[in-house]
Image (cartoon, rainbow, N blue to C red):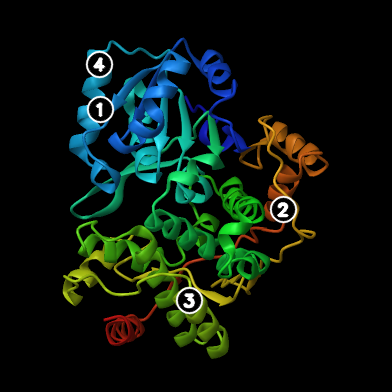
Amino acid sequence: MNTTITPILPTATTELYLGRDLLQGEIIPHLIKKWGHRAVLIADPIVAELYGTQLSTKWKAELIVLPKIGEAAKSRETKEWLEDQLFAGHCGRDTVLIALGGGAITDLVGFVASTYLRGIPLLLLPTTLLAIVDASLGGKTGIDTHHGKNLLGSYYPPKAIIADLNTLKSLPPTEWQNGLAEILKAALIANPALWTLCDKSWRSKLEQIVPLAIGVKIATIEQDPLEKGFRRILNFGHTVAHALEAVAGYQMAHGEAVAIGLIAESYLSMRMGLLGKGVFEEIVARIASSGFVLQLPWNYDRSKFLSALAYDKKTARGVLRFTLITSIGKVYDARSSVVNLEDHQSSPSPMHHSSAILMQYGSRHDASNLSHSEALQNSPNLTARRIYDARSSLVNSGGEYCSSVPHELVLDMIEWMENKLR
């Protein structure tokens, strides 16, 4: 007998809260009560000391402090250790897992939540700029292996994301750069207005920049929640970046790797005849003046780099594939024409600091979510409208957003990197 099963993931929605002073309000206790009867807060040692101890007491949540910090925590060993902690604590399916920290923590805890007892409720509390504008959005979870980054994982949308911009005050310079690299990527693939905002004074314009960057990410994942095609535009710069991180043994800052990846894949776009030389030079100048080191890892080796590239998830039949651009804010569609991702946003508006829910996002195939999006367009909340405007300008035309690149051009890109970035 044939049975049709309605997929859960493409219709899943996530509540998104963005503002200031959100962690001190009543949002988290309300969400814990809504989705379970018990909460476990997970953080690394640094974030646990900054926020975790106080917040776990406030929310009556159990606190688990991970034994490792940052990307080192994204391993099979740490995942197993965390699962053992949950089993030892007799955590059931009514347990809400709360990930407090940067992208590495949200990736790891999200993966655990997706597999523990075949799935338990998940809340993400990103505390870094990278996690707020990128890593916490979209439901991707994962851990690293010695073969490459994020090669084990799942798609598991959190019930809610609560992004409190006040947590950014404690960020070290490297973490600001990590977030800026992802913001620049969003600008290059989808939003020229965002690119303009990312000048030397960009940190003073977070209330304008963050909603635009979030809008690009949400627009993409709504239209392609399981990365069947369109969502691959988010990989721009990351084919090179992930390979560099693997070569460096994940001791290279993600922002530095992405900054190099954005330049290298812009160079590849130029060599493919898609991107003008003047635009490429503008991209290099902007990134070079944004505080990035732009140096290959000290232990860089070409053969290892090529091997790491081969593990990229976009590779098909042994041929490397890249997301390419034709201009700032325009992605190349290999099957038809350039995808124009024009920004229809009006002049920048200050972020509304209310703790009220800003929006829900999910697949645009979900009728209830479409109704919510229409209401969001007319929302009195300025930040919500800003996100809506950014995401409504990004339209999937059904094309092919990864291009097969001849091996000789890949080698040409590598030679350029080796000459310019050492």
Residue ID for mark 2 = 392
Q: Earlier in the sequence, mark 1 or mark 2?
A: 1
Q: Residue at x 53, y 50 (%)?
A: 133
Residue ID for mark 3 = 289
| Residue 401 in view, yes or no | yes
Indicate the quadrant where residue 89 lies: top left
Q: Earlier in the sequence, mark 4 or mark 2?
A: 4
Q: Residue at x 64, y 55 (%)?
A: 212
Q: Earlier in the sequence, mark 1 or mark 4?
A: 1
Q: Residue at x 29, y 53 (%)?
A: 149
Quarter holding the C terminus?
Answer: bottom left
Mark 4 and mark 2 in contact? Answer it, CB < 8 Å.
Answer: no
Q: Earlier in the sequence, mark 3 or mark 1?
A: 1
Where is residue 117 shown, x and y percent of the image? Answer: 33, 19
Other-residue count near label 1 (Cα within 10 Å), few / some / many at <14 / 14–19 / ≥20: many
Type of residue at label 3?
Ser
Q: Residue at x 33, y 21 (%)?
A: 63
Indicate the quadrant where residue 355 lies: top right
Residue ID for mark 1 = 82
Other-residue count near label 3 (Cα within 10 Å), few / some / many at <14 / 14–19 / ≥20: few
Vertical comparison of 243 with 207: above or below: below
Residue ID for mark 4 = 87
Where is residue 258 shown, x and y percent of the image? Answer: 40, 65
Vertical comparison of 140 with 415: above or below: above
Where is residue 238 shown, x and y percent of the image? Answer: 40, 63
Image position of 194 (left or right of 275): right
Q: CA distance from mark 1 to mark 2?
A: 39 Å
Other-residue count near label 4 (Cα within 10 Å), few / some / many at <14 / 14–19 / ≥20: few
